[in-house]
Amino acid sequence: MPVEFDGFTLDRGARQLRQGTELRHLSPKAFDLLDLLLCHRPNVLDKRRLRARLWLGAHVSDSTLATVVAEVRSALGDDHRKPRWVRTVHGVGYAFCGDARDSGPRSAPAQGPVAFRLLLEDREVALQPGENLLGRVDEGVAWIEAATVSRRHARILVDEDQAVIEDLGSKNGTFVRGERILCATRLAHGDVIRLGRVSMRFRALRADLSTASEAE
């Protein structure tokens, strides 16, 4: 879903930043950085976490990260001394400090309660309200035994009629609809989720239909 803020639009699908109808150039790293800051607004993301997410564990210096931050500010016309969009928290990291809103079409409201499930290769598991941990841990919603899956790989947060998946800093990444996710991503019925090399399908069904299906 695109994000809009004061005339700017960050289009995740097209991987473009626009100011009105004008394209503002961002390198892939700068685009991902702005996307991360917008996803977690208004929270501060520390430098260690940003380096891990943007460079996937490769060693880079704070000055390299600062160069990418400067590129984002330049594209937005932002001033680090009086920031409108990207705020520096000295000794910690960076945060998006402006007002922004998600735009684009919204899903139609569900009719009745919704049951969320994950269909794995060998089983189907029900997702419960709150946090559903995915990985190689006993407290996870399903133990996933695979070398490419981290111990605490990802989590799915269920809240009434929606489910959102978030990567937990895994080594091999979490993918939804073929794209590696950098921030919390809302799931839709039929989405294919991949943890490392392990794939599964997300299902969102009205609870009465789910119950009827199990009984048949």
Image (spheres, helix red, strand yellow):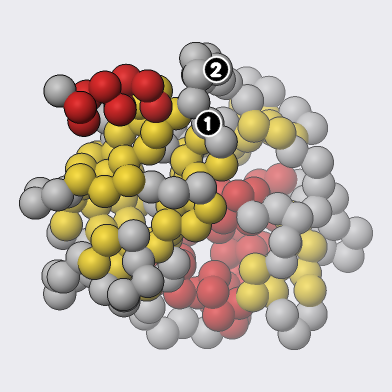
Quick one: 195 or 123, which is closer to the camera? 123
Which residue lies most toward the right here? 82
| Residue at the spot of label 2 | 109
- Specify the amino acid type for callout 2: Pro
Task: Give the mark nearer the N terminus: 1 vs 2.
Answer: 2
Left or right relative to 102: residue 185: left
- Specify the amino acid type for callout 1: Asp
Q: Is residue 170 visible?
A: no
Residue 209: x %, y % from top left: 32, 20
Task: State the CA–CA distance, disc 1 to disc 2.
Answer: 8 Å
Quick one: 97 or 116, which is closer to the camera? 116
Residue drawn where x is 56% and y is 49% of the image: 35
Q: Is residue 147 visible?
A: yes
Q: Which quarter of the picture shows residue 109? A: top right
Quick one: 182 or 156, which is closer to the camera? 156
- Quarter that holds the C terminus: top left
How dense is the environment of label 2, judged by Cα within 10 Å: few (below 14), some, or many (20 and up)?
Answer: few
Residue drawn where x is 35% and y is 26% of the image: 205
| Residue at the spot of label 1 | 161
Which residue lies most toward the left here? 122
Do the residues under discs 1 and 2 have CB atoms within 8 angstroms?
A: yes
